[in-house]
Amino acid sequence: MTNKKLAWQSEKAGFEEAVAYLKGRAIGAIQSMKTPWNSFNAATVDGLEWSSMTVIAGRPASGKTAILQHLIREAMEINSTQQMRVLNFQLEMPKRSLAIREFSAAAGLSYKQLCSAGGYKLSVTELEKIAKYAEYRIKYPIDVVDTSCSVNDFKDIVHSYMDTHKTDKGYTNTLVTIDHSILLRQETFERDRTAMLYNLGEAITFLKKRYPIAFVILSQLNREAEDPQRNEEGKYSNYVLESDIFGGDALLQHADTVVGVKRPLKYNIRIYGPEKYIINDRDIMAFHFLKCRNGETGIAWFKGDFGRMQVVETDTPAQQERINTKNK
């Protein structure tokens, strides 16, 4: 007997849904969730579509958390015409540390300065400014999960969250983020971390079909991405490759957009990749768009202000060969 849950359906419903979606976008009733970065929006569908999944991967200290927190911090104001919420699975640091890092961006002070460390003493005026920012900031519907959870816990929490905030108009557009996916708790039936990530990918695919959620997941790169041979200047191997993503296809095959992040000077790479980009700033970040289901792959350039948890777009670095040509 055929399982009704697995039975086929006419493609009619899909076509009708697609036409309604395109009409909604044409009249502005349906919009993507814009990010703070024009190049990121250009690589996607003018931002992150609801019911999509984005993976941002990098080695430790590559700036992934700064990217994510900048995105969350700016999301509400950039998309003020849309009704939306944020659910942040913050599995790396406590809520207090997360808030202080946000104060850093708002106050223009480093984490150490905010903590009155390193010879700096936070003034009463600065404390009042931070308190006012906190009062302003908490008006936004942003919620945090900072307790240990498995993939099954993650699914249950997302289901509950979407049902809790459902209105008479339907489910609320929600940005769901995980910092970092590798920190989800492995269950006994999952033989290793890769198996856990496969389960996470399948869970997110199910959830994004059911709810208007834009998932942004932070992931790791394999250690092989740091091999000395990969750091020989001017080589294609300088770049982040799909094979560098931890767990291989575990998340890659489920994602709509995959971005590999690298800070070349962290590895003493001053001439980056076969295009021979000249890197002279340790905080320059290359965003490698490895997969763009509805856009174009390529490299975009950013600069991190990690003390203030900000990431801003910057000009494409000059290229060595072009400079040499001009000087001849």
Image (cartoon, rainbow, N blue to C red):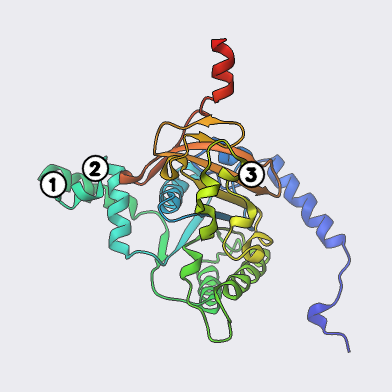
- 63 or 312, which is in the foreground? 63
Relative to residue 185, is residue 106 drawn left or right?
A: left
What crowding class fits label 1: few (fewer than 14 Cα within 10 Å), some (14-19), or many (20 or more)? some
Three-letter amino acid code at disc 1? Leu
Type of residue at label 2?
Leu
Q: Earlier in the sequence, mark 3 or mark 2?
A: 3
**Residue 324 placed where, x, y %?**
55, 17
User: What residue do we see at 28% from left, 46% from top?
Assistant: 104
Query: Badge 2 local density, few (<14 within 10 Å), some, or many (20+)?
Result: some
User: Of helix, strand and loop, which one carries label 1?
Assistant: loop
| Quarter of the image that includes the C terminus | top right
Residue for badge 1: 122
- Position of residue 110 measured from the top left corner of the image (x, y, whole percent): 25, 45
The one nearer the camera, 227 or 100, is 227
Residue labelled with disc 2: 109
Q: CA distance from mark 3 to mark 2?
A: 32 Å
> Residue 68, how many percent across, how many down?
45, 52
* Disc assigned to residue 44: 3
- For this orientation, the residue located farthest to the top is 328
Instruction: Check disc 3 and give the amino acid type.
Output: Thr
